[in-house]
Image (tube, helix red, strand yellow):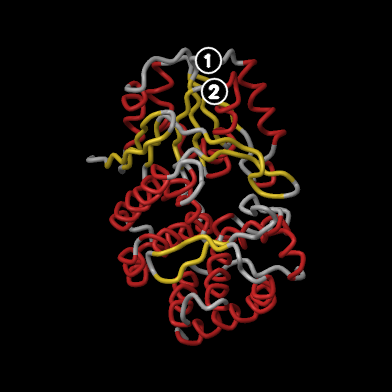
């Protein structure tokens, strides 16, 4: 095993993403390099812990006073009640300021546990062990933590960088197919905003990626992690450059919140959001139709998505106005004029957004039919 080490600079200091097949067998050694802890508290979901818990816990748990806390990782439970429940479990387990929290799971576990770590006793050490594709390439990196409110996604949270991230592509073998395909949306996002070469690789090799070919994953995951690390090192608190990571997310968050977080997994909403953002960019004249077609075609390669909801465009538009990226009452969209380039736009005409919301479902449904016909 030759793990790749990717460095991330943050206001709290530098931390590493250690990425490699089998890295979890060396979790104890990697965490020991962080210093001594009075106790270790693993937080995971029952399903994830059954799949990977032994790999993480075997050596680390034997060497430290450790406790395992299991919680449901449904998006609908990513809220303040779950934060309180985990925090009270920590109190009952005797966690103090010298304790370490280890988040083992996907984006929901990472976001919630990260927020707990930032809040409990005003901050305890944190290690991420991401077990989904979206967490390995995106959500575990950069220190954004938070939970949802009924009014919108991730409206309560904190910037709290971890001390270490341990990423093992091999754990993705047990990931449900739907979650894996949803995670590929974030990989496509990174290729659109920062890596034309990776976009071309995905166009040619999506079949291999969908089969979870280990060589393909060992190529893609560190490359994506490095993109995210580079962006968040330059802009930790989303004051400028980091906003490009939200490509597709203004539409995605509206789709998620208006469907009560029950219709889409996050990556699926991002997939729809990227296609809608490409249409919007064309609608306001910053990119051509061929570029839109390439984005839509690549997103469609990841497989079927839950359909666009039967929700009035005005309702989706109003949900966008509650998004945390709205500034001084103005909607902000991250749009891409060409591969490898993206930026924030806040003077997007409302009627252009409404046209996209009205026509995107029909246009994108037709594009899916054309793709199906081409492969018949």
36, above or below 353, in the image: above
Within-10-Å neighbours for mark 2: few <14, some 14–19, many 20+: some
140, above or below 252, in the image: above
Marks 2 and 1, how far apart at CA: 7 Å
58 displayed left or right of 113? left
226 displayed left or right of 70? left
Pointer 2 or 1: first along the chain: 1
Q: Position of residue 353 (x, y in %)?
A: 65, 71
- Which residue position is annotated with label 2? 123
Residue toward you, 227 or 341: 341
Q: Position of residue 314 (x, y in %)?
A: 76, 68
The structure residue drawn at horizontal position 60% and vertical position 26%, both measured from the top left corner, is 119
Residue toward you, 118 or 335: 335
8, above or below 302, in the image: above
Q: Position of residue 225 (x, y in %)?
A: 37, 48
Within-10-Å neighbours for mark 1: few <14, some 14–19, many 20+: some
Q: How many marks?
A: 2
29 displayed left or right of 236? left
The structure residue drawn at horizontal position 59% and vertical position 12%, both measured from the top left corner, is 94
Q: Secondary structure at mark 1?
A: loop
Q: Quadrant of the N terminus?
A: top left
Q: Are marks 2 and 1 in contact (CB under 8 Å)?
A: yes
- Which residue position is annotated with label 1? 97
The structure residue drawn at horizontal position 44% and vertical position 15%, both measured from the top left corner, is 37
The structure residue drawn at horizontal position 72% and vertical position 64%, both measured from the top left corner, is 316
Q: Position of residue 271 (x, y in %)?
A: 54, 64
Q: Secondary structure at mark 2?
A: loop
| Image quadrant where residue 203 sits | bottom left
- As drawn, the label of residue 176 is none
């Amino acid at each position: 095993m030759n793990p790749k080490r990717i460095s991330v600079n943050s206001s709290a200091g530098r931390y590493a993403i250690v990425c490699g097949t089998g890295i979890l067998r060396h979790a104890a050694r990697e965490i020991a390099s962080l210093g001594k802890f009075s106790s270790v508290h693993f937080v995971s979901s029952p399903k994830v812990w059954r799949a990977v818990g032994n790999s993480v816990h075997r050596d680390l748990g034997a060497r430290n006073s450790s406790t395992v806390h299991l919680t449901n990782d449904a998006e609908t439970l990513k809220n303040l009640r779950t934060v309180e429940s985990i925090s009270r479990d920590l109190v009952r387990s005797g966690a103090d300021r010298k304790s370490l929290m280890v988040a083992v799971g996907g984006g929901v576990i990472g976001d919630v546990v990260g927020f707990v770590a930032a809040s409990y006793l005003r901050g305890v050490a944190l290690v991420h062990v991401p077990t989904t594709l979206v967490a390995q390439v995106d959500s575990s990196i950069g220190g954004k933590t938070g939970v949802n409110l009924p009014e919108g996604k991730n409206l309560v949270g904190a910037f709290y960088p971890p001390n270490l991230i341990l990423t093992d592509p091999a754990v993705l073998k047990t990931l449900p197919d739907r979650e894996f395909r949803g995670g590929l949306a974030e990989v496509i996002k990174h290729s659109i905003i920062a890596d034309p070469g990776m976009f071309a690789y995905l166009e040619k090799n999506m079949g291999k990626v969908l089969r979870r070919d280990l060589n393909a994953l060992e190529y893609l995951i560190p490359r994506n992690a490095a993109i995210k690390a580079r962006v968040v090192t330059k802009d930790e608190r989303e004051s400028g450059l980091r906003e490009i990571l939200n490509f597709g997310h203004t539409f995605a968050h509206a789709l998620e919140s208006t469907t009560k977080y029950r219709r889409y997994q996050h990556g699926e909403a991002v997939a729809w959001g990227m296609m809608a953002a490409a249409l919007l960019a064309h609608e306001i004249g910053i990119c051509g139709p061929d570029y839109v077609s390439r984005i839509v075609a690549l997103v469609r390669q990841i497989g079927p998505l839950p359909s666009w909801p039967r929700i009035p465009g005005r309702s989706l538009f109003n949900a966008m106005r509650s998004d945390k990226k709205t500034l001084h009452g103005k909607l902000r969209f991250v749009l891409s004029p060409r591969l490898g380039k993206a930026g924030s736009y806040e003077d997007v005409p409302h009627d252009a957004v409404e046209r996209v919301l009205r026509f995107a479902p029909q246009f994108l449904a037709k594009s899916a039919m054309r793709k199906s016909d081409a492969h018949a």
